[in-house]
Structures are given as structure tokens and as C-alpha cells.
Image (tube, rainbow, N blue to C red):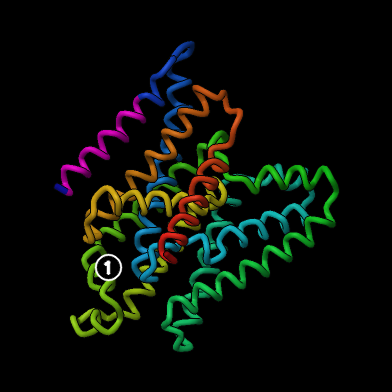
Amino acid sequence: MAKRRLTYLALILIGVSAFFLFWNLRGPVGFILNLRAEKLATLIFVGAASGAATIVFQTVASNRLLTPGIVGFDALFIFIQTMAVMALGSAGFATLPALPKFLTETAVLTLFATALFGILFRTGARDVVRMILTGVILGTLLRALAGFAQRLLAPSEFAVLQQSLVASFNVIDDELIAPAGIALCVALAVCLWMARGLDVASLGRDKARTLGLHYDRFVFLALIVVSVMVSVSTALVGPVIFLGLLAASLAHAALKDHRHLVLIPAAALIGATILVTGQTAFERVFGLQSSLAIVVEFAGGLLFLALVLRRSS
């Protein structure tokens, strides 16, 4: 049953991807197909990474209400962008080479998460909830610092900064797609390789250790893989906090299966389908008059509130 449902999800993704590529195809076909294929690859990579990373993160945190973005990736991304505009000015920031900028942002975001996880685990803070709360506090601090710095910017510099803070799937530099895709595919493969261990880790620390799993080391590795996936996605298109929560919740509802070997690919397929379908609707129906990221965040926020209220009742 689970394999059949995964097949259906894959067929749905293939269908909406084909519609995105070939609908109303006119003019220079090769040129247009190339542009659409690059955008489609970005949508699939980011959606799949967000869904898979959230499944893994929720397992190690033992909480289906959480998403990796809550640790503070978005706040650090905003802080990095703000400091770059403040140091270089609007003209210097706009002319930064795309690939070095992407690699730097990815490295900083990954190192931030790795340092946070490593320090807490080394000091004996094995409680993942404590780690998440620490990330939330650091995120609040970074947002406050970024907000203060933004007040010092000139109006033209602030306008340039605002454009870089909202996740966008409309304009993606083609030289970033290959390195981002390779990194995300490798990370997704590692998640699938860890699937059976995640099944054991979901039982809790004591039971997992009884069954022979080196729980602390395994959870630390899982969090590092999550940080890589979220960092690459954030550096590529910007922060999309609640996309993973949407994909993970729909994966649990669609499969009703506890095995991560099917949950991870299901969440990846659903996350990619959400982005491809949404972008198709905005480009073909709304004429890019709306931002897909804003709508996804709105829907994810509503889902988060619904889950919290259901849990409390």
C-alpha cells in the first residue's frame, strides 16, 4: 500500500512538472524550455529538501509540530544579508558574484547549525528541546540586531535588501543549480540511508540505546544532514520556514506509516509538488502577481496553529 501511494505521488509530480514545462509553449522552444527546466529543477530540489529535512528533524525532536527553520536559519540569513548590504552598499551587494555568495552563505549557515548542535551535545545538553529553545533565542537576537542595522540603511539600500529577504523562485542563477542540486541529492541519499536508524531513534533515547543504536552520535549526524539541506535551500532561494511542515504533515496523513524509508521520499515528493503546482498557478493564472513563498508561509502558519490547537485540545 505504501509503495503504491508513493507511486501515485511520483506520478502527480511528473504530471504537474510536465504541465509546467510544456503548457502554452511558444516562440523559441529551446530557449524557453531551458529556462523552465532550470526553474523546475530549483522548485523540486528545494521542495524535496524541505520535506525530507522536516521529517528527520521531527523524528529526532520527537515532535511533529516543529520545523528546522525554527532553530534560526531564517534569522541568520536575514542578518547575513543585512550586514552585506551595510558593508558593501546597494551597488556592491547587487554586483556580488552569485556562486561565491551562495557558497559563503551556505557555509555560514551550516557552520552556525553545526556549532550550535556541537556545543550543546558536548556540554551534555542531550535534550533536543533545549537545543531548539537555544536556537529560538539566538534567532530572536539576530533578528533584533538585523532590525537595528536596517534602520541605519539608506532608503535605496533598504529597498535592495528587502528584495533579497523574501524567498523567490522567479529568478535563479543557473550556475547555482548544479552545486545546490548535488548537495541536496547527496543529503537526501544520506537521509534514506539513515531511515532504519531513524525508525529506532523515534522510540526515544533509552529504548534506542537498548536496541544497540549509538543514539547521541546518530542524532548529531542527523541534525548535521538537516542543517546542510536547510542551509543550501535557504542560500539558494531564501527562507521558507513552513513548507517542510506542510509536506511532512501531508506525508503522515497520506501514508499513515511510521517507516522513514517511505515517509522521507513521500515528504520530498509532496514538498516538490507543492512548489511546482503553486509556481505553475502563479505564472499561468495570476501572472506572477503574487509571491509563492508568502502563500506557502501563510498556509503553513495556519497548519501550525491548527496542529497546536488540536494538540492542546
In the displayed structure image, the side of residue 226 where residue 151 appears, left or right: right
Residue at the far top in the pictured view: 27
- From this view, report whether residue 92 is shown above or below residue 58: above
| Residue furthest out toward the bottom | 124
Number of other residues with Cα within 10 Å of mark 1, as a class: few under 14, some 14 to 19, many 20 or more: many
Q: Is there any visible trace of residue 300 in the rendered image?
A: yes
* Residue under the point 30% across and 81% down: 205
Q: Position of residue 60 (x, y in %)?
A: 36, 70
Magenta residues span 2-18
Q: Secondary structure at mark 1?
A: helix
Name the spot of residue 195 as percent of width and height, x first. 24, 63
Question: Is 133 drawn above or below residue 302 in the view shown?
Answer: below
Say which residue label 1 marks. 198
Q: Tell me if 213 is positioned left or right of 309 in this view.
A: left
Pick whichever, 66 or 120, lies toward us: 66
Asked if residue 253 lies in the magenta stretch, the reply is no
Residue 3 falls within the magenta-colored stretch: yes
